[in-house]
Image (cartoon, rainbow, N blue to C red):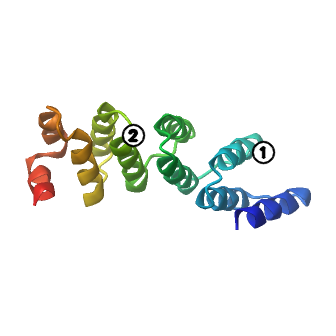
């Protein structure tokens, strides 16, 4: 389906009707199809066309980068989102937490959790479990308890 979406984007650009929705949908289709380099190129093209991506577009990219195991690019994507004043939501943080659990540094997990608490996000149980797994075997459980609160840790261990 990604190839059809790319073709449609080309046609819409040709007639001057390539809106942010068309670009974002094409990025999502490429992300779903495992074409992450192409999806990232499309994000750059969207910016060059002076169209703003929405948070859902960035979350699609994060999902793809998680499957690819590319936490460094995921950090850059989150930086780009914040530069255009998009505030990460629970989906964003869940993707980042899962990525760090699987591949990235555990300190990033603590940083993101601290930020999410400041934004009053409610992390999913999966987000909490991903954090616990990322920190398993480390002596950082105390820091996690300070960020999440003792009740959250007790709930997660049940």
In the figure, 56 relative to 46: above or below?
below
Disc 2 element: loop
Q: Residues within 10 Å of mark 1 (few under 14, many from 20)?
A: some
Is residue 124 visible to us here?
A: no
* View extreme (right): residue: 15
Left or right of residue 136: residue 39: right
Which of disc 2 and disc 1 is earlier in sequence?
Answer: 1
Q: Position of residue 121 (x, y in %)?
A: 31, 52
Q: Position of residue 28 (x, y in %)?
A: 62, 59
Cα distance in 3D space between marks 1 and 2:
33 Å
Q: Nearer the viewer, residue 157 or 9?
A: 157
Say which residue appears at 10% left-offset and 61% top-offset.
158
Q: Residues within 10 Å of mark 2 (few under 14, many from 20)?
A: some
Q: How many marks?
A: 2
Pointer 1 and pointer 2: residues touching (CB < 8 Å)?
A: no
Left or right of residue 61: residue 103: left
**What residue would you read off at disc 2?**
103
Left or right of residue 39: residue 151: left
Say which residue appears at 71% left-offset and 43% top-offset.
41
Where residue 147 is drawn, which disc sits there? none
**What residue would you read off at disc 1?**
49
Q: Position of residue 91 (x, y in %)?
A: 41, 56
Q: Quadrant of residue 19?
A: bottom right
In the figure, 122 relative to 133: above or below?
below
Disc 1 element: loop
- Between marks 1 and 2 in the image, the one whose residue lies nearer the viewer: 2
Is residue 99 visible to us here?
A: yes
Q: Quadrant of residue 110?
A: top left
Q: Position of residue 59 (x, y in %)?
A: 51, 53
């Amino acid at each position: 389906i990604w190839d059809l979406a790319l073709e449609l984007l080309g046609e819409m650009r040709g007639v001057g009707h390539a809106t942010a929705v068309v670009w974002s949908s094409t990025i999502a289709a490429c992300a779903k199809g495992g074409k992450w380099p192409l999806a990232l190129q499309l994000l750059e093209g969207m910016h060059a066309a002076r169209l703003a991506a929405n948070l859902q577009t960035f979350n699609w990219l994060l999902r793809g980068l998680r499957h690819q195991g590319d936490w460094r690019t995921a950090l850059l994507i989150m930086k780009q989102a914040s530069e255009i004043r998009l505030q990460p939501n629970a989906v964003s943080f869940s993707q980042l937490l899962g990525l760090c659990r699987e591949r990235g540094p555990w300190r990033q997990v603590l940083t993101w959790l601290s930020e999410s608490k400041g934004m009053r996000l409610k992390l999913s149980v999966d987000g909490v479990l991903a954090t616990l797994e990322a920190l398993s075997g480390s002596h950082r459980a105390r820091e996690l308890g300070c960020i999440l609160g003792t009740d959250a840790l007790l709930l997660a261990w049940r």
